[in-house]
Image (cartoon, grey):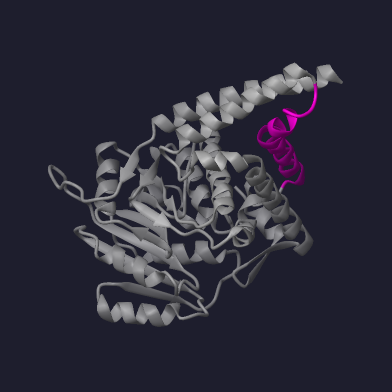
Amino acid sequence: MNMFFFILAIINIVIWVYSVLMFVNYLRKKPIFHGGNCSDKEIIYPSLSVVVAACNEEESIRQSISQLIDQDYPNLEVIVVNDRSTDHTGDILKELKNEYPQLKVITITELPPNWLGKTHAVYQGAKEATGEWFLFTDADVMFSSGSLKKTLRYSLVNKIDHLSVNPNIIFKGFFFGGLISIFMFAISYIFMMSKSAGLGAFNLIKKSTYEGIGGYKAIAMDPIDDFALGKLVVRKGYNQCFGFSKGLISVRLYDNISAMIKGIEKNQFAGTNYSIIATIVACLLNFFMQVYPFLGIFFGPEWARILCGFSILTIAVYYNYSKRYLDVSLKQFLIHPISASLYLWAILNSMVKILSRGGLEWRGTFYSLAELKKHAL
């Protein structure tokens, strides 16, 4: 039994050291976008269409759309797609239209078959877009001045076809921040391993690239549409880049831990293509990597406990380095096993809820599991 614990501890520390080295190497190559104005020297900005899908966004949409329209960007088109909202989103958009006549508003009242609400809304917005570049974003994302110029300039200079930017996350609460940290680590790690990226807060893509991958019609039934878009870009051989915001864009994802677990329900099981085995294996691996070292320091032979201690120190290094890019704090490391356990619960909750319902229920619409599997990438 002592040998068993010793082998577990060795495997754990080896994987952690290797993972951290890989992650540091991955992050240091990524651009960091700071807020503030952008120089116009030696650059001709192409026309840009911003497409915003909105469903019941009355709390944030006025500020978000105003910040977009007020951007100092030449030849800018802003299109908002009101996707069957039942709150005051439609009324606010009417007011914004009066204030900003250049704003384009599309109202959707029905969802056709074989489409998710979000993908259909973005698809309809993209059909009306006239820009040489498209920016797909959400109605709760806030933009600092110069955001559009800065990211377009970077894309043009570096010959990038698709740029996705990880936003700054606004949250309140120590334990909630810990869960946010684990969530952002998981997303960044998935991007690193898959060598593709895409986030709904900021997907900037050339129109020709968007058309070349088949547009949103190609991912009509994919709940993780932002990441699916990024995967298609890479599969088709286009040049993609993933960067990080430090004051460029921000978003308040959820109000609390409970809302976050409910909110990410649609993504977690979909991330394994609805495979029960893959989901359970992912949970076991995550438990072994994220929680076991904090238990292992109390159990097993002395050398196994010492090795678990080294794994914990490696996790602390992981947090300390990542704070340069992500909204994480070294103090959140103190509750790492609790945060990781909450995230594992969110993964299992996603699987159990979708299996028990026979599909995904999201924003008032039900999508059968059979249809979701049929259209998975």
**Residue 276 lies in the magenta-colored region:** yes
Residue 363 location (% of width, % of height): 59, 69
Residue 86 location (% of width, % of height): 52, 80
Comparing 54 with 258, the one in front is 258
How many tags in the picture? 0
**Picture quarter with the N terminus:** top right
The residue that appears at 79% across and 27% down in the rendered structure is 299
Where, by quadrant of the figure, is residue 284 drawn? Answer: top right
Residue most extreme to the left: 41
Q: Main secondary structure of the magenta part?
A: helix
**Residue 214 lies in the magenta-colored region:** no
The reply, left or right, for residue 248 in relation to residue 140 is left
Query: Does residue 213 sit above or below 15 in this rendering?
Result: below
The residue that appears at 33% across and 81% down in the rendered structure is 95
Query: Does residue 119 sit above or below 213 in this rendering?
Result: below
Instruction: Tell me if I can see residue 126 in this picture.
Output: no
Query: Does residue 124 sit above or below 131 in this rendering?
Result: below
Where, by quadrant of the figure, is residue 354 drawn? Answer: bottom right
The residue that appears at 48% across and 49% down in the rendered structure is 229
Residue 102 location (% of width, % of height): 25, 72
Query: Does residue 341 sit above or below 375 in this rendering?
Result: above
The residue that appears at 62% across and 23% down in the rendered structure is 310
Instruction: Tell me if I can see residue 184 in this picture.
Output: yes
Where, by quadrant of the figure, is residue 260 drawn? Answer: bottom right
The reply, left or right, for residue 87 in relation to residue 302 is left
Residue 291 location (% of width, % of height): 69, 37
Range covered by the magenta-colored residues: 275-300
